[in-house]
């Protein structure tokens, strides 16, 4: 199911008792930690915790532990293989937007100094297509407020509100915002 959703560019949310043992213990079981890592490698965009943080004894350690596991699991991803598999299994013909997303994400490994993709979107479609191909860099997407909320459920997208995303200054403003957030270097 996760694979089919990834190919269709739909966000995947894993919401179960991911760290059930942490309701009463300060550390997860080995199996739970492994399940989180597998969910990340399978392509999950969001991993939710519920009871573990709502009524568990260790809500902060749950979140910290989840973050550490996800970060380590993401380091192990073979982004180039994921990209190639998604391109191979995406039904053809593809739209112009999807072709652009494939091209951008395919070019990232060739540009070692590239550490951010900046995009402007009215609908969120291009940002979602970019994240479908799991680039090894973050995506900064400017969009209307209602679209920003929808994009938060996609891996790697950092939403950014700009009141006039159709203006000529929007890109300059986004670059300055990226610098302020220390997402890219000056130069």
Image (cartoon, grey):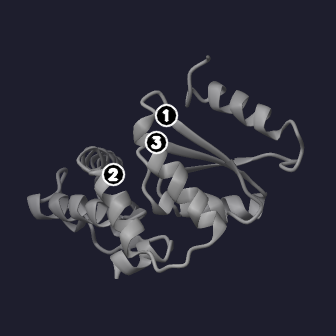
In the depicted view, which residue is nearer to us: 139 or 103? Answer: 103
Q: Residue furthest front?
A: 93
Q: Are marks 2 and 1 in contact (CB under 8 Å)?
A: no
The relative height of residue 135 versus residue 125 in the rendered view (above or below) is: above
Identify the element where label 1 is drawn: loop
The relative height of residue 73 versus residue 29 in the rendered view (above or below) is: above
Query: Which residue is rendered at x = 20% and y = 65% of the image?
Result: 35
Question: Nearer the viewer's eye, disc 3 or disc 1?
Answer: 3
Which x, y percent locates residue 28?
Answer: 17, 56
Identify the element where label 3 is drawn: helix
Q: CA distance from mark 3 to mark 1?
A: 9 Å
Identify residue for label 3. Answer: 108
The dot on residue 79 is 2
Identify residue for label 1. Answer: 115
Q: Are marks 3 and 1 in contact (CB under 8 Å)?
A: no
Instruction: Please state if 5 lies on the left or on the right of 25 as rendered.
Output: right
Residues packed near mark 1 inside 10 Å, few (<14), some (14 to 19) or many (20 plus)? some
Which x, y percent locates residue 150?
Answer: 63, 66
Q: Could you tell me if residue 44 is visible in this image?
A: yes
Which x, y percent locates residue 152?
Answer: 57, 59
Question: Nearer the viewer's eye, disc 2 or disc 3?
Answer: 3
Identify the element where label 2 is drawn: helix
Query: Which residue is rendered at x = 53% and y = 63% of the image?
Result: 153
Q: CA distance from mark 2 to mark 3?
A: 10 Å
Q: CA distance from mark 2 to mark 1?
A: 14 Å
């Amino acid at each position: 199911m996760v694979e089919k959703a990834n190919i269709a560019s739909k966000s995947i949310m894993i919401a179960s008792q991911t760290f059930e043992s942490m309701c009463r213990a300060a550390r997860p079981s080995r199996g739970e930690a492994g399940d989180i890592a597998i969910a990340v490698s399978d392509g999950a965009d969001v991993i939710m915790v519920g009871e573990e943080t709502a009524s568990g004894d260790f809500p902060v350690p749950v979140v910290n532990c989840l973050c550490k596991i996800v970060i380590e699991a993401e380091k192990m991803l073979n982004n180039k293989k994921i990209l190639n598999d998604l391109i191979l299994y995406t039904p053809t013909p593809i739209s112009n937007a999807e072709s652009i997303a494939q091209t951008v994400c395919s070019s990232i490994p060739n540009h070692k100094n590239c550490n951010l993709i900046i995009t402007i979107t009215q609908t969120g479609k291009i940002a979602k297509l970019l994240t479908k191909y799991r680039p090894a860099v973050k995506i900064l997407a400017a969009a209307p407020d209602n679209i920003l909320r929808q994009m938060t459920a996609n891996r790697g997208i950092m939403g950014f509100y700009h009141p006039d995303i159709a203006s000529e200054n929007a890109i300059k403003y986004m670059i300055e915002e990226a610098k302020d957030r220390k997402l890219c270097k000056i130069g």
